[in-house]
Amino acid sequence: MMRNVIWLVLVAVAAVVAAVTFGRNDGLVSIFWGGWRADLSLNLSLLLLFIGGALVLAAAQALMALFALPTRAAEWRALRRERAAQAALRESMAEYFSARYSRAYKAARRALVLHADGAATDREFAVLAHLLASGSLHRLSDRPRRDEQLAQLETLLAAPGQPRRADDGARLLAAEWALDDRDPERTLAMLAALPPGVARRTQALRLKLSAARLAHAPQEALQTARLLANHQAFSPDVARSLLRALAIEALAVPHDAEQLRDAWQRLDAADRRDAVVAAAAAERACALGAHDDARQWLMPLWERLDDLGEDGRTRVAVALLRAAKGIGADWLPRLQTAAEQHAHEPVVQAAVGAAFAERQLWGKARQLLEPAAADQRLDVAVRRMVWHRLAVLAREEGDEHRAAACEHAACALDG
């Protein structure tokens, strides 16, 4: 309503201005053509000139529109194709997330065909369509055709141009599919080719961790898991458990003492302070005949037994029980202190008794080993080791009857 009022005011103002300007205009325009003469008032001449200019302008615009019809028709057809391609891409995404992978693949292929029929300048559109087609074929376990799609996608990604966000997603998904194919080497190669910023993302690190574990590369898996723990990708308990398990796996790989020392030095300081990891390293060293290394790794933990907790003390004590062979006299004060402070823990008593027996302190050793061997709280395997130690001790004293009894007691244990 207000707009109509404003227009009426403007028209009235224009009428007043025209009446004042042209009302008393006595000018005359004469036009001569051959032998003819036409006289027009100045007002009429101006009006006719204005109308003629308007007609010429309208005719020029009409001619321009006529000549532009083919171009506009081509643009309209391209717009229709683009809209159809976008609709096919959205359909493919909807079908993919609805787990109708065959339909999703067909829709993605239709989107690619429509996109190729057009100008084909939207690189990101093509990447997304290839991703949906490849992902659908991967879900359908059609690996040959999926690899064909991936090859086309790699060609598209290798083309010069500014990288887009979809490019990173394509590379990460390709690495994930390689991992699903149980091909860790290919997965690691794809992840190594990622830009540094993408390779540090949590998803990339998770894929690298899984691939390293599948490839039996515990050192690389351990480093990756530590990065994920620093990124808070796991809860503290899960991170601690995972790092411990990977450290133990890394220590199980070496086949000689030198390799084991190198693996131990490559562990993080926090891993070396872990009682479970140190005990596993010591037991592995004993299996390889490196008892001195085992005791060296156990010594820092033995000196702070009170801080380890019951489970940690058990692990360290069992490891020392295995590593007692060749133990030096410098351990005796530490062993005596541990036996006094943990008199009610049979596993600590057993470890100290085995060390005393190795130092030929047979009386002290028997006082600690015999109660430990009879204690039902001890693990069966540990009790069996203690009985064998007692049998060896009896033979050292020349008591074959007692040694046979100890061997019989060890054999009588279940498990």
Image (spheres, grey):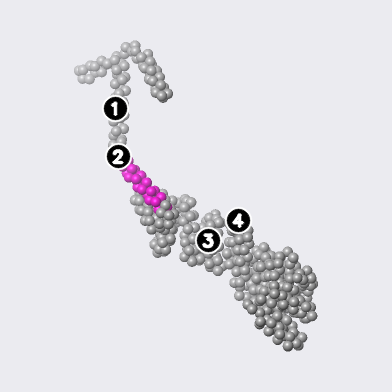
Q: Name the residue under label 2.
A: 69
The relative height of residue 48 versus residue 405 in the rendered view (above or below) is: above
Residue 379: x and y in percent read: 67, 74
Q: Which mark is residue 232?
A: 4
Image quadrant in which you'd find residue 315? bottom right
Look at 66% across and 79% down and name the residue there.
413
Which residue is more in the foreground, 288 or 342? 342
Residue 81 sits inside the magenta stretch = yes
Look at 66% across and 68% down and name the residue there.
276
Query: How much space separates mark 3 and mark 4, taking CA atoms?
Result: 16 Å
Q: What element carries label 1?
A: helix
Query: How much space separates mark 2 and mark 1, taking CA atoms?
Result: 21 Å
Quadrant location, the N terminus:
top left
Q: Which mark is residue 55?
A: 1
Q: How crowded is mark 1: few (under 14 residues within 10 Å), some or many (20 or more)?
A: few
* Badge 3 or badge 4: first in the primary sequence: 3
Quadrant location, the C terminus:
bottom right
Image quadrant in which you'd find residue 77? top left
* Badge 1 or badge 4: first in the primary sequence: 1
The span shown in magenta is: 69-93
Question: Could you tell me the amino acid type at mark 4?
Answer: Gln
Q: Name the residue under label 3.
A: 207
